[in-house]
Amino acid sequence: MKRLSNAFSYVFSDNEWFNKVLVGGLYLLLIPLGIGLIMLNGYLVEFISRNKNGDKGMPFWRNYKIVFGKGLPKSWFSLIIIVAVYVFAGFINIEITIPYAILSVTFFLTVNSLFITNTFDLFSIFVSCVLLLIALSIGWMWIVVGWPLLIFLAILVQIHLFTNPN
């Protein structure tokens, strides 16, 4: 429980946390186009670096060339998954329900985070999946603003859990 509270306090200790989470939420909406995933992964790589170095605060988004450059090599696996889903969905006419979509997105974002951090900690995976499920489940009530913000916030907490054993 202390790890979870440390993860939340790390994110909220940044004076500009809301603006950074807002931009991350906007990129989250662009994941289906690919560019959002690359930018998010680049930001998460920089977030991990700052986190491991003990730096206070989250990285800025304004260094978009650096963020893109760091995100591109970490995104190939997730981009392949996105393309496979598009191809699969094109061949099979599947009715996607809200619960199915929530579980699928939770699984995808967790696998993406595991790929970025190269970790496998069962406690962190369980807690982060629960956080993402909650964010995805209640975030839809505030479609435009709340959903992407809650999910990106949950991803930041998830990454902090994966990269900080304490």
Image: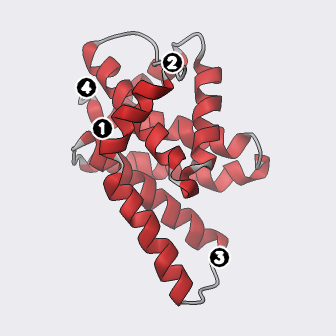
Q: Please tell me how crowded label 3 is: few (under 14), some (14-19), or many (20+) other residues with Cα within 10 Å.
A: few
Query: Which circle marks residue 97 in the picture?
Result: 3
Q: Position of residue 53 (x, y in %)?
A: 26, 14
Q: How many angstroms separate mark 2 from mark 4 (CA)?
A: 25 Å
Inspect the image, locate mark 1, and give the three-letter code of the amino acid beneath it.
Answer: Phe
Q: Residue at x 46, y 18 (%)?
A: 58
Eye-nearest disc, 4 or 3? 3
Whether residue 124 is visible to the viewer of this picture, yes or no, is no
Q: Position of residue 75 (x, y in %)?
A: 36, 49
Q: Position of residue 18 (x, y in %)?
A: 64, 22
Q: Please tell me how crowded label 2 is: few (under 14), some (14-19), or many (20+) other residues with Cα within 10 Å.
A: some
The image's colouring method is secondary structure
Helix, strand or loop at mark 4? loop
| Residue closest to the far bottom | 92
Q: How many angstroms separate mark 1 from mark 2 (CA)?
A: 21 Å
Query: Which circle marks residue 166 in the picture?
Result: 4
Query: Which circle marks residue 60 in the picture?
Result: 2
**Most foreground residue, 157 or 20:** 20
Helix, strand or loop at mark 3? loop
Lower sequence index among marks 4 and 3: 3
Lower sequence index among marks 2 and 3: 2
Eye-nearest disc, 1 or 4? 1
Inspect the image, locate mark 3, and give the three-letter code of the amino acid beneath it.
Answer: Thr
Q: Which residue is mark 1?
A: 162
